[in-house]
Amino acid sequence: NDRKVYNLTITNKKMAPDGFTRKMFVINDKFPGPLIEVNKGDTLVLDVKNDCDDVTTMHAHGFFQRGTPWYDGVPGQTQCDIQSKKSFTYEFQVNQSGTFWYHSHSKAQYIEGIVGALIVHDPDDPYLKNKDYDEEIVVLLQDWYHTDSKTLLATFLSPESAGNEPTPDNGLINGMNSYNCSGAPNGSDCVSDAPLANFKFVQGKKYRIRIINTSAFAAFIFSIDNHPMDVIEVEGMITQRRTIHRLPINIAQRYSVIVTADKPIGKYWMRSEMETACFAIQSDTLNPLVKAIVEYEGSDANSNASSTAWTDSQETCVDLDTSTLKPYEAQTIPDADYKLTLNVSFQPDDKNVTRGFINNSSYVDPNSPTLLKVYENKTTFDSNRNAYIIDKDKVVDIILYNTDTGDHPFHLHGHVFWVLGIGINGTSPDYNSVNTKDPIQRDTVTAPAGGWFIIRFVSNNPGVWGFHCHIEWHVQSGLVAQFVTQPDKIKELKSPDDWSNLCKN
Ligand code: C2O
């Protein structure tokens, strides 16, 4: 097992991922950030140097951080921000494998560029051992705004927005797309027809494509013309193969699919279609269809792709129906011994700003992280932290009921959970309909508008773990909770000094 060190320097930079120039945050001068690859069992070191004009943090999304809860990267929960011109090193053991990503957890920075893919390889992966694929491809999907998030947030968190989220200007695949500059404001620095991402296929080869949605707001439906995809992984869980044509993928979700390059040599469209049906505000200038090119070796360089899209219908604003996916290896699901019901709603606060509420409380970023409070022997937290204390090793069910008119992709830090059931609009949580026999495990699940989900996790990882909607606008408007698990055991873990020093500024 190795110790793999990645140096990540955060700066501001003007870039034009889709031809429209704007100020961004970048890692090591690049966008998206560097691809991080480790093996299961490695120690991963993220050496973050903050050379940008703002505070920052780094969160490895989907990692357990067992024994190192202070390296989970969440300001207000697990650490204080890394100030401008300061550095901080995260170091943790990687005892899981699959498709992950990393991003800043401060303000809305990740949607402005502090984002990248994090892949954990496992030599025992059954599809790898069977030689079911020859090569790997990583595909980052995201929506893209031409206005900085500070400006967007100021409007969103004011009475005039009425809680309607800003609509993206564009979408990107691996940080690229074109944009029609006639939609851009006068005087902007914009070039139409910027290049699309291009993926090379060799005829006869099989590819494991790892798809990650790193959006602020948009869910996507992903497909490659003429090429069916076999789903084999959901957020670290290896599944039995299931062939699909179109993959709905919400924010922070990941899938691996196997695609065989068995079509005539040529160019085909990769499509990532923004699910604008879930948006509060429709836009005239947004082209919801984000494209990239899949180019077989030997294609005519001057030809264009002329393939046509799959026509299968697909429900929008809901997850891929994971009840149709089966774990590769059978699991035994323990019974729950603690049930927590959470009601999600959006309501105006006393200043008439629409905010997200979980059980009548809206999260406000505190100055001092909850984990530090635990070390200071605090046992109660004010309601703005939305902290739920689970003091023993328990099997927890979260029954989340979404009374809002939008869908919400919820992510739990530090764990994976079984998706026991999801109910659509107009139904109420129903234990009789759930699957406790062979559900899949993941770390991000969508609560449909007016619907619900029931998830189960084993709370045996001492730490402070965020649980939040991954729509970045909703994080900023308070749709966030946290679990403080086994505080006594947390205190037995020795936290590093450079970590607590972050809070002494
Ligand atoms: Cu992608 Cu709170 O994380």
Image (cartoon, rainbow, N blue to C red):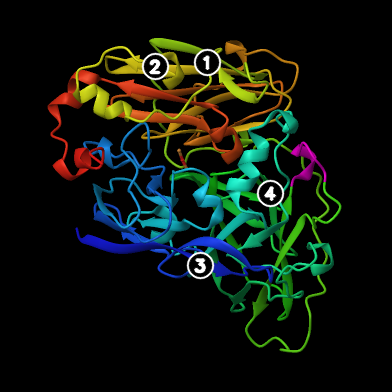
Q: Nearer the viewer, mark 4 or mark 2?
A: 2
In this rendering, is residue 112 above or below 409? below
Mark 4: which amino acid? Phe
Asked whether the viewer can see residue 320, the reply is no
Residue on which disc 2 sits: 388
Dot 4 or dot 3, earlier in sequence:
3
Mark 1: which amino acid? Ser
477 within the magenta span: no
Q: Nearer the viewer, mark 4 or mark 1?
A: 1
Dot 2 or dot 3, earlier in sequence:
3
- How far apart in space, not on screen, are marks 1 and 2 (Cα)? 12 Å
Name the disc covering residue 13, or none. 3
- How far apart in space, not on screen, are marks 4 and 2 (Cα)? 32 Å
Segment colored magenta: 275-282
Q: Position of residue 312 (x, y in %)?
A: 80, 49
Left or right: residue 350 versus residue 162 is left
Left or right: residue 320 versus residue 282 is left
- How far apart in space, not on screen, are marks 2 and 3 (Cα)? 39 Å
Residue on which disc 4 sits: 220
